[in-house]
Amino acid sequence: MSYQPEPPPRGEKMHSHPIGRVEFEVSRLNEDLRTIDGFQMNQAYSEYAKGDWTTCVLLNRTGNKNKGLSEEYEGHGVPTEYGLQVPYLLETVGRLFKTEHLKSARIFSASNGFIVPHRDYVEFKKGFTRIHLVLQTNDRAMNSEQRTVYRMRVGELWFLDGRATHSGGSFTEQKRLHLVLDFDPEIPIRNLFKNPTNYQPGLMPYLIRRPPISKEKLEELLTSLGVILTELTYDNLFEVVAKLHFEHDLDCEWTYDAMIKIASRSGNGRLIERAHSARQYFLGGLRKAS
């Protein structure tokens, strides 16, 4: 794989994109990161997670750190017990953004873990404008949107379009930490910034090029996996297939088409139904509002 800061190739439209940069006070940031290391992480949305991918809540509707699910509501969020323990992070958010539009602030943590390809907000009426601020990362941390794989760098602010199929995590024991902010989606992104000059949507993303894989190789792979797919191996094979687009030039949504084909070749009716249900759940909207 090659790593290079450049725009997406012609024909690829990337909805998620960097929108600014933050110059951290490193000592204060590190103090808050050490504090976060002691937090008990929340298992909300664990059905998306493979490996060590967890969250903790710094700000939400109620101020209850144990309420990890996203909520649509009127008004703005209030700090939780955990949020009050990371003053530099909340100060940074307050310096950059109009927090009267902020609904939640969470830490997304990944270490040898990732979230499977999915679409966000299908259970909500409006959803959110979601912005990531990268606090800590590593060379094996990656995100994807459709066919594009990219890395968010420390200090970058990203608009992440959750309505496009996406995935991401850290594929090493080194921890990746993002501060994830959900805003009122009816406010234009530029107007979320206190100082409009901090909104810089023209920044180049750091893309990761992956080698192609031939149709013949894919067919061979799907056939061989169909032979070993059982009730016992389904979860393991799904995790492997969900990671393939990070290594090869594939659309992350292909994960579900591939699992349906693998299940079909296994001849197991229950697993065929399970593969179809997974595609509908993660991409099509069977989730209920939280």
Image: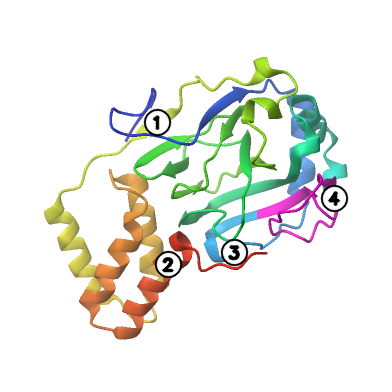
Magenta span includes 141: no
Q: Amino acid at mark 2?
A: Gln
10 Å crowding of disc 1: few (<14), some (14-19), many (20+): many
Give SS at disc 4: loop
Locate the C terminus and report the quarter of the image it occupies: bottom right
- Tell me the distance, in whole angstroms, between the alpha carbons under discs 3 and 4: 21 Å
Task: Identify the image's colour scheme: rainbow, by chain, secondary structure or one colour.
Answer: rainbow
CA separation, marks 3 and 1?
27 Å
| Badge 3 or badge 1: first in the primary sequence | 3
Q: Which residue is mark 4?
A: 80
The quadrant where residue 263 appears: bottom left
Q: Locate residue 69, reporting x and y percent.
A: 69, 59
Residue 207 marker: 1
Circle 2 crowding by C-alpha within 10 Å: few under 14, some 14–19, many from 20? some
The residue beneath circle 3 is 46
Q: Position of residue 188 (x, y in %)?
A: 63, 31
Label 1 or label 2, whichever lies nearer to me, is: 2
Q: Residues within 10 Å of mark 3 (few under 14, many from 20)?
A: some
Task: Point out the tag, 2 or 4, that comes first from the N-terminus.
Answer: 4
Q: Earlier in the sequence, mark 4 or mark 1?
A: 4
Q: Nearer the viewer, mark 3 or mark 2?
A: 2
**What separation in Å lies between label 1 and label 2 (alpha carbons)?**
29 Å
Looking at the rendering, the stretch of residues picked out in magenta corresponds to 55-79
| Residue at screen point 30% across, 76% down | 229
Task: Check the image and name the residue furthest to the left.
Answer: 216
Q: Residue at x 32, y 36 (%)?
A: 1
Kind of residue sitting beneath label 4: Thr
Instruction: Give the mark nearer the N terminus: 3 vs 2.
Output: 3
Q: Residue furthest bottom?
A: 269
